[in-house]
Image (tube, rainbow, N blue to C red):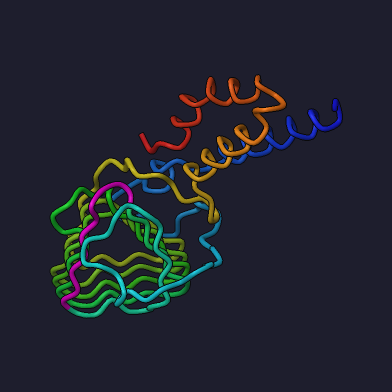
Amino acid sequence: MKKWLRSSYLLCCYLLSLAVQAETCPQIWTSAVQGSSAVPASVSYSPSSPTSINSLNTTLAAADYQLTNSTVANNTTLTASGPTVRIFFNGSLSIGNNVRLNALGNAENLLIVATGSIAIGNNTVIKGFILAGGSVQVGTGSQVTGAITAKGSAANFGTVSMTRPHCLCYKAGWFVEPLWNVLMILSKMLHYRIHGLLAAVVALSPLLQLMGACD
């Protein structure tokens, strides 16, 4: 019993350490357009069940979307219904001309992550936070409200207006929100044997939520 208890304790400590190490949004999006960013250390993930952007509704519920497309076609309109719609592209991404991504919503409702480079076409409107593992280019007449961070170079020929990032943060494929859910599930599984573990996790919830928030 003592050995099992010790193993459970070490597992919880490990999961908590992952939350502590996660970068916060203000560390990732430090300015309207940030090129050659050292944070995060890498932008990578392995899609588990990728889908096509053509299969999505025009209004997206808050969730994670893993897309196979490398192109968002001209004149595409997508709306994020609330915080946070998180869209992942495994590779480079080309966003066409006259695209509207969350154009009428709050910037914290949309997070776009591409492991490669991102090219935004002309006269496109995006309200959200963008993270690229490669370079980013914003086309003429395009407007981004939120912030852009690239591991590579950043070229802005449009207008990017910085807003405070309230979204949950990306860290090497991890999110603090799902990590918090893992802790809660684990604590419930162990509750019948260690009543104190659930109480401890619940007591830590305000701290964990602060770690996961981008404020």
Look at the image and tell me in which quarter the N terminus lies: top right
Q: Nearer the viewer, residue 182 or 42?
A: 182
Residue 133 locus on image (x, y percent): 47, 65
Residue at 53% x, 20% y: name it.
203
Residue at 56% x, 66% y: name it.
46
Q: Is residue 115 above or below residue 185?
A: below
Q: Is residue 71 above or below residue 38?
A: below
Q: Is residue 83 magenta?
A: yes
Q: Residue furthest front?
A: 192
Residue at 44% x, 30% y: name it.
210
Q: Nearer the viewer, residue 186 or 114?
A: 186
Residue 190 locus on image (x, y percent): 67, 32
Residue 24 locus on image (x, y percent): 45, 41
First to last magenta residue range = 75-84
Q: Nearer the viewer, residue 124 or 8?
A: 8
Q: Is residue 190 magenta?
A: no
